[in-house]
Image: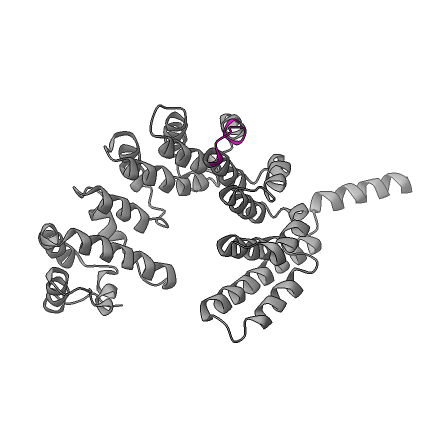
């Protein structure tokens, strides 16, 4: 999409400053890949925009980014990371949740350590999970990765607000550092369901089968927060042993959000009967809610992807195994 010309962008700014109740949604696209002149004029008028309008705009940009992969509001969000309003800073971080630019790391670390607002520190801790994941995949410089890990470990063990410490633990789930295992175990065995929930989030991100039993047991927990986190962790871990419980939950779970999580996790796990169950649910929704139908169709697409991976794994041959088998055959011939 072409950036708006200065003349047309002035219409966007006028609408932003207007007393009209709603900001025209047609203008949201104009903030995508914004040009330097337009960003400059936006920042000049930004202090005059009503606080409620600022937050609504950032929420609507975030919602648009969720459904339209072609838009990018990174430049706007970066510029607002230092906004005087903590709610604006929080939403700016959220708008950057898929941005892999390592230049964001120093800003996030500074906010995590020094921002006076709990919500901003918590959002910064959550945002750093992306860079922990990238660090484990060797996709960012090692020194930067260790800076992120060290900061999150320090936060998780600090006297900061408990919500910030829990967010740090969740982000550390991707880390392979041995200290993280101890942190997860400690959180999971607390009597606080919020800490148990965060531990399960970290388990789901760990790609570590050591947590299989804890996740499976938590699928039937009476607390909705713990049950939902366990369902999501089972999917992320592709936990085959969770399949029978999740299939049973399809017919028994009363919480709509948990039920959606069950459906998605089953699409990540795959295996016997899952496609039949999901297709039956879709058939029953044919005249129902369009959003539910779209979600089921997306889950079935994801299941197809999971099934393709399973077939690939079955067909994959380890060349080392072949060589060892040939060597054994040669020894027998001799």
Give the camera-side residue of 138 and 123: 123
Side (left or right) of 278 relative to 330: left
> As displayed, is residue 220 above or below residue 117?
below
**Residue 146 spot, x, y in % from top left:** 40, 30
The foreground one among 162 and 45 is 162
Quarter of the C terminus within the rendering: top right
- Residue at position x 50%, y 25% from top? 179
Residue 10, picture quadrant:
bottom left
| Above or below: residue 184 compared with residue 312 | above
Q: Residue at x 24, y 64 (%)?
A: 28
Q: Which residues are magenta?
A: 186-193
User: In the displayed structure, does residue 163 sit left or right of residue 20?
Assistant: right
Q: Quadrant of the N terminus?
A: bottom left
Question: In the displayed image of the protein, which residue is found farthest to the bottom?
Answer: 287
Residue 303, located in which quarter of the rendered image? bottom right
Residue at 24% from the left image edge and 67% from the top image edge:
25
Q: Quadrant of residue 140?
A: top left
65 or 143, which is in the foreground? 65
Residue 132 lies in the magenta-colored region:
no
Q: Is residue 294 above or below residue 65?
A: below
Q: Nearest the camera: 246 or 201? A: 246
Question: How far across and down, in percent of the image, does residue 73 sit?
Answer: 27, 56
Q: Is residue 223 left or right of residue 66?
A: right
């Amino acid at each position: 999409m072409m950036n708006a010309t200065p003349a047309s962008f002035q219409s966007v700014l006028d609408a932003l400053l207007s007393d009209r109740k709603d900001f025209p949604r047609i203008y949201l696209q104009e903030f995508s890949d914004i040009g330097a002149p337009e960003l400059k004029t936006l920042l000049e008028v930004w202090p005059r925009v009503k606080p409620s309008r600022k937050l609504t705009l950032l929420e609507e940009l975030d919602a648009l980014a969720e459904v339209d992969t072609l838009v990018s509001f990174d430049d706007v969000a970066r510029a607002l990371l230092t906004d005087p309003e903590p709610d604006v800073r929080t939403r700016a971080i959220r708008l950057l949740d898929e941005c892999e630019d390592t230049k964001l790391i120093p800003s996030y670390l500074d906010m995590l350590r020094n921002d006076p607002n709990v919500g901003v520190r918590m959002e910064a801790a959550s945002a750093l999970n992306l860079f922990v994941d990238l660090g484990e995949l060797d996709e960012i410089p090692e020194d930067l990765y260790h800076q992120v890990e060290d900061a999150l470990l320090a936060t998780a063990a600090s006297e900061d607000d408990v919500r910030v410490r829990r967010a740090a633990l969740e982000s550390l789930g991707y880390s392979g550092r041995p200290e993280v295992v101890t942190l997860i175990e400690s959180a999971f065995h607390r009597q606080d369901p919020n800490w148990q929930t965060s531990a399960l989030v970290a388990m789901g991100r760990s790609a570590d089968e050591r947590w299989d039993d804890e996740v499976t047991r938590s699928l039937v927990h009476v607390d909705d927060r713990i049950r939902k986190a366990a369902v999501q962790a089972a999917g992320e871990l592709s936990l085959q042993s969770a399949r029978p419980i999740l299939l049973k939950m399809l017919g028994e779970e009363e919480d709509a959000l948990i039920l959606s999580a069950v459906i998605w996790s089953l699409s990540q796990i795959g295996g016997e009967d899952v496609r039949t169950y999901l297709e039956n649910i879709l058939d029953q929704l044919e005249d129902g809610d369009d959003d539910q139908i779209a979600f089921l169709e997306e889950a079935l697409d994801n299941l197809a992807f999971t099934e393709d991976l399973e077939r690939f794994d079955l067909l994959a041959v380890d060349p080392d195994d072949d060589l060892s088998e040939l060597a054994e055959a040669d020894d027998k011939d001799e």
